[in-house]
Structures are given as structure tokens and as C-alpha cells.
């Protein structure tokens, strides 16, 4: 059994300062607006952008792609680093739209906690439930922010009940709203029995903190009347019916602290930042196929959880996003890719504030850094100083919708192929190359994914495409313990076999019955609806 390398106290100290979290929600719950306001409070930006108006001159920092600015939605996750109260916070904004959920799932493997944003008018929506399942499976601690209290919304007791029922976990309100919509007066801090008075916010943060006043103050009682009494009786009910906050249950992903507020008005945002610093976990150990990796280890290790093409359209670049899992990173160090043993230099490593980048000199476990990538790195790659490790848990799901793709201009075939390979490596869409026939296939989870990819191929690669119906509706990655059986299966089913971007074989079927027949005839072949990163199912040699 392999033992862990010795810890380093300097690294341990830096690890304890790190907080890495993702913001998740259903579309339009206010996630990107909240991201902006968190950056604003931490001093990372001076004026918050808004996604409210699609034609607004100032766009959200996290929405940098042209199509995101046009549509007012997030289609790719973005990374932002900021400092707050002596902590380094790595914040990842994720796409809310379910068509891009794969990107979100991969981001959730790179963070230590999640901030769930719920629209108080709509409650718990479908995409929220799916994301929660991913968080629960990974035991990711979650903080809940109920947004848009300045609008006409559901009753807070109903919302709390809905969250508990839908998410299957206990919740502990840390604040409680007084009124809603036009009569929204603020929130009660339950622990301190203080009420913070609501005042509609601005893009900038003034020097004046939100006014706090005791809930027992007679002036407050006279001013708010019944709405305060209703809120106080609800708080009493909640305190009697719900468990108190349990740090261990929160860290195990079984309990979620709940806050109420209005992101657009800068209200309730600071409590979120304070909670992240005080309650959210620092980076923890991570599992590889070979051993458990501790963050405080001296030796460096990191995993590629995202590849983004064309962050700088002028240079057609690709950036690999790495989550540092252990050790100390310094610019210029030589790192090895565990998958193939190739070496990369890190002279141009990057830190991020969305699209803005800075050359990075050093980084520690929990940090997210970028490495310019010219096709050498793939999603799921592990980088070390030499030790052969493979981190687990980065998923690819079998797509549900397929389209054939062809160029509108035959002279642009090379641009199309290059663009598709890069977008496939990025994980924006799944790209399949049939063994027989030259027409590439695209696999996705929703129509919007195809639209975004077609837009990006035209704007970023100057390759206008036609998307045509494909006869397939099911795909499964195939593997076998017996290489000869797998080879024979691929030969006999070559008209249904494609390769994905890492060369892993995929079986395609038009109907479920075709898949059922193949599974009955080929008992030694495994059909996978999920593939681990970097085609791990097909890389048995890494275990040894």
C-alpha cells in the first residue's frame, strides 16, 4: 500500500486560507447577478454588470462569450479569484441552462462547496434538483440563497418546506425575511436577534453598511407593525420545528444553511461571503486510482476539469483549467501528464477574473489556474511532478440528441474539423467520427447546445455549418476485458461505431431495441452510459 508523502506546514497554512465554490441554480434564478455582487463586495470589481437587460452596455464579468452577451444567459462556466477577510476565494460561475449541465457537473468536481441560488417566486425548479443530486453524490457542502425577496414571491415557510422535500435534506434558516415585494423591509439575523433593514441597492457599494437594529426595538415594532410580528412568529415556529445548525452535518452535505436576500439590490450578499469564509471547508484530500492525495503534501498534483477554446478570439487559443490538489505551484516548473508521460512547461500559467487574465507566479491547493493548451492536454488529465496518478470523478454522459454536421462551404472543411475537435476537447459538445463514412456527428443534451456550437463555429472559426438530422438516438461507450472480443465487436458493427475526441469507441443505435440486441449477443462487451474523463474506462494501465 502506498503511503502519503510528508506534509509541508507552509502549504498547510495556505490551504487553510482557500475556499473554492461553485454557484449553481436553475436558469434566471439570479446566479450570475449574485456572482457579480460577490465580486463587488470582495473588491474585485468596482461596478457590477447586469444580465437583466440583454442589450445593456455593461455585461456581467462572468459572461464573456459573444453569444452570452446576446442572449443574456451563461453557456460556459467561468472562473474568478478574489481575496476577502484574509481568505483566497476561487469562485466558479456555472451555466444554469440544462443543455449545458455537463459543464456544470465537471465544475462541481473541482470545488469544495456549492452556493445554491433559488428564485423565491419559482421555488425549487427541475435543474436545481438535478444539480443537487450531483452535489449529494459527492457529499458537497451547500449554502442556500433564496433570491429576489424584493418581488412578490412564495411564503418563506412554503419555500423552506419545498427545499426540504425536494432536496431531501434538512435546512437551517440563518436569516428570515420581513415582508416581500414592495413591502420587503429586510431580514432578521436569527442568531443575533438583529434585523438588517433593506434599502434598494446600487451598482456600487457605498461606505454605509446596511442598518442593523434589535428586533425588540419599539421604534422598529411601530414602523413595521404586523409584518414584523408575522416574521417573528414564523422564526419561533422554525426554531421549534427545525434542528439547529450542525457544522459536521453541513460539511457532510446533509444540512444546508439558508439565507434570504436580493442580489440585484446588494442585499444579503455579505452574509454569504462571511459564511463561505467561516463555515465552508478548506480544500480536502482527493482520491486517485492509486492513493489518497492530501492537499498539504509537498509534491504538486492537479487535474484538468475544463478546457475552454477561444477565450481570446484574436489568438484562437485554448486554455486548460486546472484544480490544484496538492503541493506548491510556481511558474516555470516542469510537469508531467500521467496519461502519456509527456512534459509541459508552465511559463505562461494564468489566474482569472473571468476573461481577464494575469500571469501567475505561484498557487496552492484549492486554486484554479490556467495553462495555455495546444492540444496536449485533455479533460481529466492529471499533472504531477513525475508520480503516476489519475484523479477520478470527472464525468461524460452519453448524449441524447444527435446531428450530422457538414460545412456550407467545402473550402472550409479544415476549419470545421479543427473547430469541432477543439470544441469537443473543451466539452462544449460531444463529437463523434464514424469509422465508416466521413460525416462527423455531434451529440448533445438540448437543442440550444447545437445552436451555440453552430454560432461559435461561424464566429470563432469562420466555418458556417449545416446541422442535419441523424438517425441515432442512443450512444454507449464500449469496452471489454478481452481485447480480441472488443476488436471483433467493432469490426462486425463498424457501421454503428464512432470514435469520440479521445479515440474511445462508441456504439450508436437508432432505437433501444438495437442496443438490447447488441447487449444480448455480446455478453463480454460492456456498454457504458457514462465515461470517466480522458477515456479512463479504456486505460487500465494507469492502475498499475
Image (cartoon, helix red, strand yellow):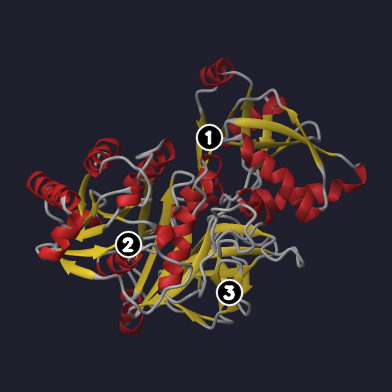
Which is closer to the viewer, label 2 or label 3? 2
Disc 3 designates what residue? 350
Give residue 402's quadrant in the image: top right
Secondary structure type for disc 1: strand
- For this orientation, the residue located farthest to the right is 411
Name the residue that disc number 1 marks: 480
Residue bearing mark 2: 268
Residue toward you, 461 or 274: 274
* Viewer can see residue 190: no
Whether the residues at callouts 2 and 3 have beta carbons within 8 Å, the answer is no
- Dot 1 crowding, Cα within 10 Å, few <14, some 14–19, many 20+: some
Q: Earlier in the sequence, mark 1 or mark 2?
A: 2
Nearest the camera: 184 or 120? 184
Q: Is residue 199 above or below residue 436?
A: below
Mark nearer the N terminus (2 vs 3): 2
- CA gap, disc 1 and disc 3: 40 Å
Q: What separation in Å lies between label 2 and label 3 (alpha carbons)? A: 31 Å
Amino acid at each position: 500500500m502506498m503511503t502519503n508523502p510528508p506534509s509541508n506546514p507552509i502549504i498547510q497554512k495556505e490551504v487553510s486560507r482557500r475556499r473554492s465554490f461553485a454557484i449553481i441554480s436553475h436558469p434566471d434564478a439570479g446566479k450570475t447577478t449574485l456572482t457579480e455582487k460577490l465580486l463587488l463586495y470582495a473588491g474585485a470589481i468596482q461596478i457590477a454588470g447586469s444580465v437583466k437587460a440583454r442589450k445593456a452596455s455593461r455585461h456581467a464579468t462572468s459572461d464573456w462569450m459573444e453569444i452570452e452577451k446576446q442572449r443574456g444567459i451563461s453557456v460556459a462556466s467561468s472562473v474568478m479569484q478574489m481575496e476577502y477577510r484574509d481568505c483566497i476565494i476561487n469562485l466558479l460561475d456555472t451555466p444554469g441552462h440544462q443543455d449545458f449541465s455537463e459543464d456544470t457537473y465537471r465544475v462541481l468536481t473541482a470545488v469544495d462547496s456549492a452556493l445554491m441560488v433559488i428564485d423565491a417566486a419559482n421555488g425549487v425548479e427541475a435543474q436545481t434538483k438535478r444539480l443537487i443530486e450531483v452535489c449529494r453524490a459527492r457529499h458537497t457542502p451547500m449554502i442556500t440563497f433564496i433570491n429576489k425577496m424584493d418581488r412578490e414571491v412564495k411564503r418563506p415557510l412554503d419555500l423552506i418546506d419545498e427545499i426540504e422535500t425536494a432536496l431531501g435534506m434538512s435546512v437551517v434558516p440563518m436569516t428570515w425575511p420581513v415582508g416581500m415585494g414592495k413591502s420587503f423591509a429586510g431580514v432578521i439575523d436569527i442568531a443575533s436577534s438583529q434585523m438588517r433593514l433593506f434599502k434598494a441597492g446600487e451598482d456600487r457599494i457605498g461606505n454605509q453598511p446596511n442598518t442593523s437594529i434589535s428586533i425588540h426595538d419599539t421604534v422598529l415594532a411601530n414602523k413595521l407593525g404586523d409584518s414584523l410580528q408575522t416574521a417573528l412568529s414564523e422564526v419561533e415556529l422554525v426554531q421549534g420545528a427545525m434542528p439547529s445548525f450542525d457544522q459536521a452535518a453541513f460539511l457532510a452535505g446533509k444540512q444546508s444553511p439558508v439565507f434570504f436576500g436580493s442580489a440585484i439590490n446588494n442585499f444579503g450578499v455579505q452574509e454569504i461571503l462571511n459564511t463561505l469564509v467561516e463555515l465552508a471547508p478548506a480544500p480536502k484530500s482527493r482520491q486517485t486510482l492509486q492513493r489518497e492525495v492530501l492537499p498539504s503534501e509537498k509534491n504538486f498534483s492537479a487535474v484538468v476539469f475544463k478546457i475552454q477554446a477561444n477565450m481570446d478570439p484574436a489568438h484562437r487559443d485554448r486554455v486548460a483549467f486546472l484544480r490544484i490538489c496538492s503541493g506548491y505551484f510556481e511558474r516555470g516548473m516542469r510537469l508531467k501528464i500521467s496519461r502519456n508521460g509527456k512534459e509541459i512547461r508552465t511559463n505562461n500559467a494564468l489566474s482569472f477574473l473571468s476573461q481577464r487574465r494575469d500571469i501567475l507566479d505561484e498557487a496552492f491547493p484549492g486554486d484554479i489556474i490556467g495553462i495555455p493548451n495546444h492540444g496536449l492536454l485533455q479533460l481529466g488529465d492529471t499533472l504531477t511532478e513525475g508520480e503516476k496518478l489519475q484523479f477520478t470523478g470527472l464525468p461524460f454522459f452519453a448524449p441524447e440528441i444527435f446531428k450530422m454536421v457538414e460545412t456550407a462551404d467545402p473550402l472550409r472543411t479544415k476549419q470545421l474539423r479543427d473547430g469541432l475537435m477543439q470544441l469537443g476537447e473543451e466539452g462544449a459538445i460531444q463529437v463523434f467520427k464514424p469509422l465508416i463514412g466521413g460525416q462527423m456527428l455531434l451529440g448533445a443534451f438540448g437543442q440550444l447546445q447545437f445552436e451555440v456550437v453552430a454560432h461559435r463555429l461561424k464566429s470563432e472559426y469562420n466555418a458556417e455549418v449545416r446541422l442535419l438530422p441523424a438517425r441515432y438516438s442512443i450512444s454507449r461507450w464500449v469496452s471489454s476485458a478481452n481485447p480480441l472480443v472488443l476488436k471483433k465487436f467493432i469490426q462486425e458493427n463498424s457501421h454503428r461505431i464512432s470514435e469520440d475526441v479521445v479515440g474511445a469507441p462508441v456504439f450508436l443505435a437508432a432505437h433501444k431495441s438495437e442496443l438490447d440486441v447488441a447487449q444480448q449477443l455480446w455478453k463480454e462487451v460492456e456498454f457504458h452510459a457514462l465515461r470517466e474523463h480522458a477515456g479512463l474506462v479504456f486505460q487500465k494501465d494507469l492502475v498499475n
